[in-house]
Every structure is written in C-alpha cells, then in structure tokens.
C-alpha cells in the first residue's frame, strides 16, 4: 500500500473538510487530471480523428495502428492521473482514516 | 462424433478437468472461519489485492464476447467490429472517474450489490428492485453469449452429437455448464478468481503466438490488410451492397462512424455498471487497488485489439473463409482459423482457453445476479430477517437458477449475431447508469423521477431492439437503430430519453415537495478507504437505518 500512512488520531472534522475540497486546494493538479482523463475518452470517441487508411505505419493502416497504439497510452495517462490524485490527498485526510469512526 | 481430433479433444478435456478441480479446491483458498456469509461466498472476503484483482477483473471483462463475438463481427462486417477496441479503451477512463467512489461507499456500509447502494442512497426499495431486476435481466443474454462461445468451439471440434434436437445436440455444452454451476455453488467467487489465473495464462500464450505466427503463414500483415480491404469493398451479389467497411465511413447511407462511436460509448458506460464487474470490484481490498487496476487493465485491451484482428486473418485465409461460409456461422471464424493454422496440440490449448475464458465470467455473472436477487428482492421483500447463512444459501441456489435462465436465452435468441446478445444486455443495464453513477455524485435526482426515467428507457430500448430486423431474422437482429438519419446504438437513445424524463420529473416533484427518502450515506464516505475488511455484520444492516 503506497498510500501515505495515517495520523491515527487526526481530528475527524479536519478529515472531512479536507476530503471536501482538494480540488480548490490544488487547481493545477486537478486540471491536469481532468485533461488526462477527458483526453483519454475523447480521442477515441471522436472517430473522424483516426478513421483513415493513410498514413500507414508499417503494414498497418492508420485506423488500426491508432487503436492499437492508443491502449498503452491510456494506461500511462491513467497511471499519471492516479499519481497526481495521490498528491491531492494530503496526509491528514489520509485514506487510512477509518470512515466508520468518522461517521 | 466421427471427425473428432483425438489430440485436440484430449487436451481440452484434461484442461477442463484441471479447471474443475481448481474450482472445487478454491473453496479452501483464504478460507474464512465462517463461509456462510455473502461477503465470503459472493465477494471472497473482500480481500483481493492489486494482483489478484487484475486477474479477476481481466477474467471478468474479457469473455467469449472478446474471443468469439468480436472477431465474428470483424469477419462479417469489417471495421465496425473495432468499436469494441474503442470501447475497452474508453471504459477505463470512465470507470476511473466513478468506480473508486462506489467502492468506498459500499465498503463503508458493507454493501454487497449495487442495489444495496441504490437502496441506501435513495431510501427506496422500489428503485433498488428496479436495479436488481435490470441487473439480472441484462446478465442473462451476457451469460448466454458465453454459452454461444463455448458452443462455437465445440462445433468446430466436432463433438456435437448428430441430432436435430437442440438439447441433445448441445449435450456436451450442457455438461460443461452443469459442472460450472456446481463449482460456483460450492466455492462462490473464489472459484472464478482462482481459475482466472489459468484462463489468462492460456489466453496470453495463444494470442501472442497466434499474432506473431499466423501472419507469417498468410504472407504478412500487408497481405492480410490488402485482402481484407478488397473483400469488404466487393459488392455482395445477394444484398447488392458492399460486404462491409474497411474503415468507418461518413456517407449517409450506412454511415458507420456515428454507429461506431455510439456503440463504443454506450458499451463503455455500461461496462462498469454491470453487476458482475461491480462484484469483481467490491471484492478488492483497498481503494488504491481499483485505481491502480484502471491503468493496468488496458493491457488486456491490447489483447482484445489483437484478437479482433483474428477476424481479418480469417478473411485473408481462403480455407477458413470457405469453412465459415459453408457452416453459415461467422462465430466459427476464430475456431476454424486456429484449427487450420495450428498443430492439433496447440489448437487444443487455444480451444481450452476459449472455453475456460467463457466459464470464468459466466460464474461471476451468475454470482452477481444471485447476490442481487438475494439482497434486493428476497431479503427486501420476502424475508427481512434472513440470517447471513440463509442469505448465502439463497444466493447459491439463485446462481443455479440464473444459469438455467441464461440457457433459455442461448437456445431461443438468434445465435448468428452473438455480439448482439451483449449489446442487448447493454441497452438494459445502461438504464441504471443515471441512478447509480448519478447517485454517486448527487442526491439532486428525485427517486421517483429516476424510476420513471428508468421505466421509459427500458420500454423504449426493449421495443426498439425487438423491432430491429434484417434479411434473415425478423426480431432482435441488431442493437443499432436509425434515428434522425444516423445509425445509432439503441442504448444511447434510450438513456437520453431516460435522463431527460428524470430531469424534468425531478424539477416537478421537487416543486410539489414529494418526499425524497432518507439518504444513509455521508459525503466523506465516497472517498473513504477503510483499511480492514468490515467486521461480519448481523443480518439487516441495510434495513435497520430505514426511516
């Protein structure tokens, strides 16, 4: 588990408020996450971008090359988004705070 | 049974027996003190880490749909079949957005099914019932698709008994299915999780070997794409139209780009709403497990892209193409291709991989449907004081019933277009997207508005799908429909109708101050990440908070 370890007795109110607005606290990181995720979806949703035979890459028409090359890129984009999200979570609102207690 | 290849048959049989043994033994894997709990039977103790979850979800997501139906569509119609590649790309970023929230809130409340969440979020038994009903209904054709996949392999192996009676002809299929039903009953989610390791290993081996080896036999990728392009551009003498499309087109007649995009988007939105995928998700230990897997699972999509290309290899190989044409069933494209290209022993491994690849998701689907029935129908409406042991027993039996329901789908619906079975399930399951995913972010929607929108989407989607016909089939022929001159996936049209009605009615019902129901969840629970598995809870956890 790579999540930062908990401060076991973090005041529960802090945990709740911080969980609420990590976006406001880190606008650039949040925007980067948004762009990564949105681009991953849109660049395959908008078919005219890649529905072409040329340019061929090796023997592969562009359409087929694009779809195959896309998947590793999505994996990388989501990995980065995941790392960035972890940065949003400050140690105090660490994931280990037991929600049952906070309730 | 005269033309059965002994080597192929033996290898498939041996691997099937191995899988069966693993299926039964897996009941002892991570054995809990008390097995008779839905958290144990149905979610394998909610203790899977990143590694096992990767295999489990991979086994869950990539099914006979991937190995048989997608290449069959590619073989038959060309580039439109690659919507499946686009769909499995899109599914992960979409799930990355909402799935961790669903995991967290279900973990905090110890909820087992998506219906439990709906019930707790909206305080509405009716909405949870709608969710359970839709989930079970949508899983039926999806399980049926797994059967059709197994059937295709058995047909090419030649093990079908020579009889015209469907039930006698498919006896081997039923036997395989019965074995699956029994080990699911005994071991619950542990069985598919353990078997997924065998499945994925077999599949990775045969796909990678096939992708590098077959093109060398067929004169390289250049030849494969060249032959395919010529084939799909040719005019079919019967239909007087081109055989298919090599690249999605924009021309208004048979415009496939819009169809391609809506099929991909609809399927992607539907994927992580399917109860069996949620079951696989909830079985994982931590929130980070889910997130990490969203970037690890696209590895399988690469595989799917390569498997889709098998459809083109089958087009480019004259012997396979002739075999498929003679049989009149495009589902046989991949099995025939392997049979023609590979030595018997390797064909056996590949066939076993496909069969096991259909059994794993079928087991998880049956478990998910059974959990929905137990938690959101049986316990909710018939036996609110059911003990965990009774719940588990109920789920075990329900998993058997669900499988036989799927058999009916497999026998009754046309098989020649198997990908449609999954798309039909998608049309239905998409209708719970607003209440489930919407509910993860907002309580703005009114429960009755969601219910009405759901009903409208279900009715429209079912009627529209029922009315699609083609040259050979009068009903349920496809899942795309012409709307405003565009060919579009019915699921997308239906969900738009659904959301519009939900929004309009919410405004009206809020103005009329109709009671909105109690919400058991708190905002921070959607981002919570409890470290330890929830303690065993007495019966009725979802019920006691009801106001």
Image: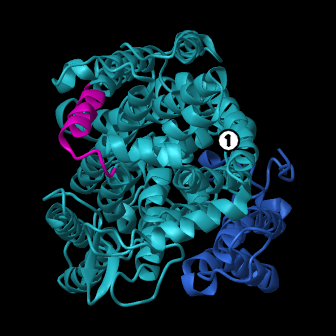
Q: Quadrant of the N terminus of chain B?
A: top left
Drawing shade for chain B: cyan
Q: Is residue B411 magenta?
A: yes
Q: Is residue B12 magenta?
A: no
**Residue in view at x 54 percent, y 22 percent:** B191
According to the image, what is the colour scheme of the structure? by chain
Secondary structure of the magenta portion, mostly? helix
Give the x, y percent position of residue B470.
20, 64
Give the x, y percent position of residue B314.
54, 50
Q: Quadrant of residue B323?
A: top left
Residue under circle 1? Answer: B207
Quick one: SS at disc 1?
helix
Q: Nearer the viewer, residue B324 or B42?
A: B324
Q: Is residue B327 left or right of residue B257?
A: left
Residue stretch in magenta: B401-417
Q: Nearer the viewer, residue B476 or B101?
A: B476
Q: Is residue A46 visible?
A: no
Q: Nearer the viewer, residue A40 or A32?
A: A40
Q: Is residue B183 left or right of residue B89?
A: left
Q: Write down the chain letter for disc 1.
A: B
Drawing shade for chain A: blue
Give the x, y percent position of residue A88.
79, 70
**Residue in view at x 27 percent, y 35 percent:** B406
Compared with residue B149, is residue B133 higher up or lower down, i.e. above or below? Answer: below
């Amino acid at each position: 588990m790579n999540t930062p370890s908990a401060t076991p007795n973090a005041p529960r109110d802090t945990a709740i408020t911080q969980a609420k607005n990590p976006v406001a606290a880190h606008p650039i990181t949040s925007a980067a996450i948004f762009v990564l995720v949105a681009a991953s979806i849109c660049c395959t949703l908008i078919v005219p971008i890649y529905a072409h035979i040329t340019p061929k890459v090796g023997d592969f028409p562009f359409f087929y090359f694009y779809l195959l090359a896309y998947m590793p890129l999505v994996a990388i984009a989501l990995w980065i988004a995941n790392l960035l999200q972890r940065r949003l979570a400050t140690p105090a609102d660490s994931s280990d705070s037991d929600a049952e207690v906070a309730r | 049974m005269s033309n059965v290849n002994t080597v192929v048959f033996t290898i498939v049989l041996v691997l099937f027996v191995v899988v069966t043994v693993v299926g039964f033994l897996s009941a002892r894997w991570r054995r809990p003190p008390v097995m008779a709990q839905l958290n144990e039977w149905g979610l394998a103790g909610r203790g899977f880490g990143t590694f096992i979850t990767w295999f489990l979800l991979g086994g869950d997501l990539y099914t006979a749909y991937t190995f048989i139906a997608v290449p069959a569509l590619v073989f038959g119609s060309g580039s439109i079949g690659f919507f499946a590649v686009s769909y499995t790309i899109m599914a992960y970023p979409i799930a990355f957005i909402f799935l961790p929230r669903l995991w967290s809130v279900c973990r905090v409340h110890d909820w087992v099914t998506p219906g439990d969440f709906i019930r707790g979020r909206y305080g509405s038994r009716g909405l949870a019932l709608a969710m359970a009903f839709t989930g079970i209904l949508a899983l039926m054709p999806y399980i049926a698709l797994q059967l059709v996949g197994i059937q295709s392999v058995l047909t090419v192996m030649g093990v079908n008994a020579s009889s015209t009676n469907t039930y006698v002809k498919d006896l081997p299929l039923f036997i395989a299915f019965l074995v699956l039903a029994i080990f699911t009953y005994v071991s619950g989610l542990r069985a598919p999780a353990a078997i997924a390791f065998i499945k994925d290993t077999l599949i990775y081996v045969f796909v990678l070997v096939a992708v590098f080896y077959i093109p060398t036999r067929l004169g390289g990728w250049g030849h494969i794409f060249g032959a395919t392009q010529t084939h799909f551009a040719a005019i079919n003498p019967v239909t007087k139209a081109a055989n298919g499309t090599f690249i999605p087109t924009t021309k208004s007649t048979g415009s496939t780009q819009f169809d391609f995009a809506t099929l991909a988007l609809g399927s992607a939105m539907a994927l992580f709403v399917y109860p069996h995928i949620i079951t696989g998700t909830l079985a994982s230990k931590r929130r980070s497990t889910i997130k990490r897997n969203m970037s690890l699972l696209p590895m399988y999509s690469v595989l799917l892209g390569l498997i889709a290309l098998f459809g083109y290899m089958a087009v480019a190989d004259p012997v396979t193409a002739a075999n498929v044409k003679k049989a009149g069933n495009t589902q046989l494209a991949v099995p025939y291709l392997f049979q023609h290209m590979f030595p018997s022993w390797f064909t056996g491994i590949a066939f076993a991989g496909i069969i096991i690849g259909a059994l794993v998701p079928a087991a998880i689907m049956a478990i998910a449907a059974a959990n929905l029935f137990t938690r959101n129908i049986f316990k909710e409406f018939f036996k609110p004081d059911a003990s965990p042991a009774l719940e588990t027993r109920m789920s075990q039996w329900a998993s058997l019933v669900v499988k036989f329901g799927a058999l009916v789908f497999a026998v009754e619906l046309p098989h020649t277009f198997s990908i449609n079975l999954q798309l039909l399930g998608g049309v239905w399951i998409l209708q719970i997207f607003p209440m489930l995913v919407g509910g993860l972010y907002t309580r703005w929607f009114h429960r009755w508005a969601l219910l009405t929108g759901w009903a409208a989407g279900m009715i429209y989607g079912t009627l529209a799908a029922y009315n699609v016909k083609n040259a050979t089939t009068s009903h349920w022929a496809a899942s795309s429909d012409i709307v405003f001159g565009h060919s579009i996936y019915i699921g997308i049209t239906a969900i738009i109708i659904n959301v519009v009605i939900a929004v309009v009615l919410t405004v009206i019902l809020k103005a009329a101050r109709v009671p909105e129901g109690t919400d058991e969840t708190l905002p921070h629970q959607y981002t919570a990440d409890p470290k330890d598995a929830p303690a065993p809870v007495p019966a009725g956890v979802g019920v006691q908070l009801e106001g």
